[in-house]
Image (cartoon, rainbow, N blue to C red):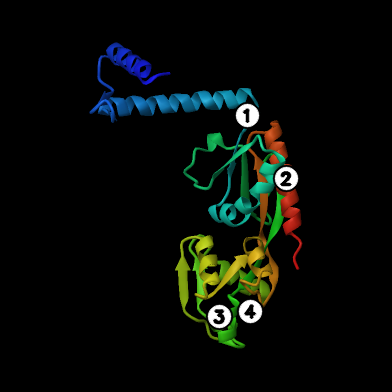
Amino acid sequence: MTHGAVSRHVSHLEAFIGTALFEGARSRPKLTAEGQVFGFALTAAFDQMEDALRIIGRGGGGILDVACLSTFAMRWLIPRLHSFTARHPRYDVRLATDDRHRRSHIDVQIMVLPLEAALPENSSPLFQEKLGLVVAPSLAAEAHADVLALPRLETRTRPDAWREWARLTCTEGHGEIGATRIFDHYHMTIEAALNSLGIAIAPWHLVAEDVACGRLSAPFGFVDSNYVYAVQVIRPGGAKTEHFVKWLKEAARQDAQMP
């Protein structure tokens, strides 16, 4: 539609409602207070219509909404997505990493569960998490034999990682503990370790490439943790979810091979 046609439709709508929806210069219009209220209401209505179409169509569209943790998305899923899109170019994968995101739009959810927890409906396991102490090789060389005395890097979203690793490796109460630096998210903690700010406890799948390339070393190796990663299909029955889950499991199996 032309700009003139849009303008005429807006004018007809304003006349029908009996109030102005836009104000300011015609070249740079702004919503009035009434226009903002109307816009929010229309957005919600269109979202409901979209949800209804997805349900009726059993998820057959090209958009694939995937929910997962932000660090998992940044350090594992996104670097591998090119292989999925190359295999299935008609799907547009959209990631939701914020718990405040409207879950009604999610097709597939990747979650972390305690090892003993029962899997939710329409879920299947991907891999058991492995934890290890990682350190930049240059920083490890400075510490000589006592790597554990280096500054510890912790994550607010997983404050018990050090205690869990110490219990799993029987290193509780070992030697002198260095200073502690705390970060909000795991990807920030790993980045700090890469930049020689200290030692960190990190899951294997998040640092595998860095260890393989020599950017990080793992002097104590990796051990099975008490958590498992799983995938849940929120909207079952669609070809896109079946294709994505199949690819996801293949990628998880490949990464399970530790050197």
Question: Of the numbered discs in the image, which one, if any, rests on residue 139?
Answer: 3
Distance between the Cα atoms at labels 4 and 2? Answer: 38 Å
Q: Are marks 4 and 2 in contact (CB under 8 Å)?
A: no
* Residue type beneath disc 1: Gly
Q: Secondary structure at mark 4?
A: loop
* Residue type beneath disc 3: Leu
Distance between the Cα atoms at labels 2 and 1? Answer: 18 Å
In this rendering, the label closer to the viewer, 1 or 4: 1
Upstream in the sequence, badge 2 or badge 1?
A: 1
Disc 4 target residue: 171
Q: Which residue shows up at 49% across the image and 26% down it? A: 48
Upstream in the sequence, badge 3 or badge 4?
A: 3
Distance between the Cα atoms at labels 3 and 1? Answer: 50 Å
Q: Above or below — where is 134 with respect to 113? A: below
Q: Tell me residue 134's x, y (percent).
A: 61, 72
Which quadrant holds the N terminus? Answer: top left
Q: Secondary structure at mark 1?
A: loop
Q: Secondary structure at mark 3?
A: helix
Name the one closer to the observer, 82 or 174.
Answer: 82
Q: How many neighbours does mark 3 have within 10 angstroms: few (below 14), some (14-19), or many (20 or more)? A: some
Question: Of the numbered discs in the image, which one, if any, rests on residue 61?
Answer: 1
* Residue type beneath disc 4: Thr
Q: Is residue 82 left or right of residue 162?
A: right
